[in-house]
Image (spheres, helix red, strand yellow):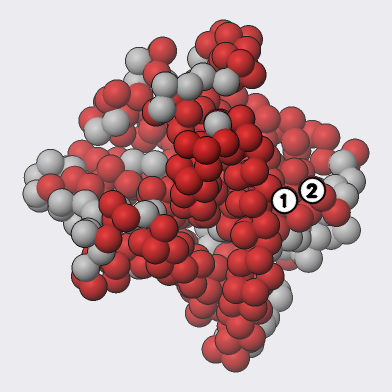
């Protein structure tokens, strides 16, 4: 039985860290390298951490892996506490209002996007189906992970009748992914794009397995090992069939994911010793906004400031300015829309908290980014 008083603090720590690892990748590495600049600190980090450990994309993919694990963990939890209608309403208000704002801001700040910003492409980007339409038009670069999240939410909502059989629910998801990948080239380029997104779902399924094993204790060690083996098979099949460029050991998705999984498990092990302070909770609460807007606002400011101030000064101004924008958006738009989602969810689906396994109120990740 789960201790109903146990608080899960490590999720706050990992959520904030994951978002800022992506910021590091994009603002401190990708943008300057695109302009022929390598920061000394980046060179040191690459030589002492990334290269020896085989971490690709300068911690960017590592951060995304953490997000996927957190999402699989948290979404599994809330799906056991919420009715299907409540679950759908809250996820819609979690993702789409902020995404719509990000699309508008991206178009406003990036001249190169305006030629692509037709009413159709704007609409498809705001609901994420642009990632499954060939040819792709992408207005918010980081939103590809949100398309994967939406697929996981859809599966979670569709599989509500199976929530009392969590191992079956997880195994079925992985088998569906394998099936989609197996026929990925049979139904045209748009279906292939859909399959390419689906191939990432096993990363979230691993987070689901960890929740079922560690927190809810709904499955035993042998069942967890079987599900993890199936997840590995699905991941490997997706890499060999679709994402082949990320299979070699020197450019491996799986190597970074193993390290992210190790950090996640370490966080779980240290959870009871953690006491997140206000700064940690602020970084966790703003992680979605940081993830969405760091590139949009950051690249705009760097492009304007570098010619006159140089890269060092431009970066020193850009990072706090970007975060100030994030705080403004978080308090004026993100929090009100989340509250609106909760208000509407209470009306479309009155709460009944007698869920499978008597999952308590203890797991309370603060406004999860998923």
| Secondary structure beneath label 2 | helix
Determine if residue 196 is in view: yes
* Residue that mark 1 sits on: 283
Q: Quadrant of residue 310?
A: top right
Determine if residue 80 is in view: no
* Residue that mark 2 sits on: 280
> Which residue occupies 51% across, 19% down?
38
Residue 147 lies, with reference to residue 213, above or below; the image says: below
Residue 49 percent location from the top left of the image: 62, 14
> Which residue occupies 78% across, 65% down?
361
Toward the bottom, the furthest residue is: 347
User: Callout 2: few (<14), some (14-19), or many (20+) C-alpha neighbours within 10 Å?
Assistant: some
Residue 299 lies, with reference to residue 74, above or below; the image says: above
Q: Is residue 268 left or right of residue 343?
A: right
> Which residue occupies 9% across, 45% down?
186
Residue 236 lies, with reference to residue 104, above or below; the image says: above
Residue 296 is marked as none
Residue 293 percent location from the top left of the image: 52, 54
Say which quadrant the C terminus sits in.
Answer: bottom right
């Amino acid at each position: 039985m789960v201790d109903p008083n146990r608080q899960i603090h490590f999720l706050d720590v990992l959520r904030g860290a994951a978002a800022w690892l992506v910021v590091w990748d994009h603002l401190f590495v990708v943008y300057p390298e695109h302009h022929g600049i390598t920061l000394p600190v980046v060179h040191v980090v690459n030589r002492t951490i990334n290269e020896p450990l085989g971490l690709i994309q300068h911690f960017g993919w590592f951060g995304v892996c953490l997000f996927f694990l957190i999402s699989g963990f948290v979404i599994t939890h809330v799906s056991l506490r919420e009715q299907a209608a409540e679950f759908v309403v809250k996820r819609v208000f979690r993702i789409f209002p902020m995404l719509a704002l990000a699309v508008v801001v991206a178009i406003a700040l990036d001249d190169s996007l305006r030629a692509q910003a037709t009413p159709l492409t704007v609409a498809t980007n705001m609901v994420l189906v642009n990632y499954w339409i060939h040819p792709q038009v992408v207005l918010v670069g980081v939103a590809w992970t949100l398309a994967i999240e939406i697929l996981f939410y859809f599966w979670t909502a569709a599989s509500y009748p199976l929530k009392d059989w969590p191992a079956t629910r997880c195994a079925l998801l992985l088998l569906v992914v394998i099936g989609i990948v197996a026929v990925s080239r049979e139904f045209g380029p748009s279906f292939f794009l859909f399959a390419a997104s689906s191939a990432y779902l096993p990363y979230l399924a691993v987070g689901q397995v960890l929740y079922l094993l560690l927190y809810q204790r709904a499955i035993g060690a042998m069942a967890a090992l079987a599900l993890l083996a199936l997840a590995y098979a699905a991941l490997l099949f997706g890499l060999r069939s679709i994402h082949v460029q990320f299979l070699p050991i020197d450019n491996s998705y799986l190597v970074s994911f193993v390290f992210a999984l190790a950090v996640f498990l370490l966080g779980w092990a240290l959870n009871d010793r953690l006491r997140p302070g206000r700064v940690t909770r602020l970084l966790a609460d703003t992680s979605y906004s940081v993830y969405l807007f760091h590139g949009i606002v950051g690249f705009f400011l760097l492009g304007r400031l570098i010619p006159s101030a140089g890269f060092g000064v431009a970066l020193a101004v850009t990072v706090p300015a970007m975060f100030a924008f994030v705080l403004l958006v978080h308090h004026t738009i993100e929090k009100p829309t989340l509250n609106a989602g909760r208000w509407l969810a209470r009306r479309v689906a009155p709460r009944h908290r007698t869920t499978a396994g008597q999952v308590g109120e203890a797991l309370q990740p603060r406004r999860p980014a998923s």
